[in-house]
């Protein structure tokens, strides 16, 4: 898989059209304490202005 430029570089908020954003990375974990499964990774991009957040599957 080739490396793509950070999603933050091309981010434009779909609510307020701001280009300022914060990125984070989360992993979905499902199940219970004794049997949990690690789900897919997601990159989150949060608008710095209005806090609208988009998720991208990694
Ligand atoms: Zn926004």
Image (cartoon, rainbow, N blue to C red):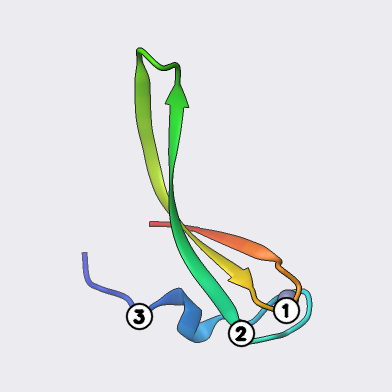
Residue indicated by mark 1: 49
Residue indicated by mark 3: 5
Tally of numbered discs: 3
Q: At 37% across and 21% down in the image, what residue appears?
A: 36
Marks 2 and 3, Cα distance to the nearest angstrom?
16 Å
Q: Label for residue 20?
A: 2
Q: Is residue 54 above or below residue 13?
A: above
Q: At 43% across and 33% down in the image, what residue appears?
A: 29
Quadrant in the picture for the N terminus: bottom left
Marks 1 and 3, Cα distance to the nearest angstrom?
22 Å
**Residues at discs 1 and 2 in contact (Cβ within 8 Å):** yes
Q: In this view, does 56 lie to the left or right of 34?
A: right
* Nearer the camera: disc 2 or disc 3: 2
Ligand 1, by image quadrant, is bottom right
Quadrant in the picture for the C terminus: bottom left
Within 10 Å of disc 1 (Cα), the crowding (few <14, some 14-19, many 20+) is some
Name the residue furthest left.
1
Which structural element holds mark 3?
A: loop
Q: Position of residue 18 (x, y in %)?
A: 69, 85
| Marked residue nearer the N-terminal end (2 or 3) | 3
| Marked residue nearer the N-terminal end (1 or 3) | 3
Q: In this view, does 4 lie above or below 42?
A: below
Q: Where is residue 23 in the image (x, y as percent from the top left)?
A: 49, 69
| Marked residue nearer the N-terminal end (1 or 2) | 2
Which structural element holds mark 1?
A: loop
Quadrant hosting residue 54: bottom right
Q: Is residue 3 left or right of residue 44?
A: left
């Amino acid at each position: 898989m080739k490396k793509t430029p950070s999603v933050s570089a091309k981010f434009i908020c779909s609510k307020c059209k701001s280009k300022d954003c914060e990125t984070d990375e989360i992993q979905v974990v499902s199940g219970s304490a004794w049997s949990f499964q690690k789900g897919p990774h997601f990159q989150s991009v949060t608008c710095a202005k209005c806090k609208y957040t988009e998720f991208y599957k990694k």
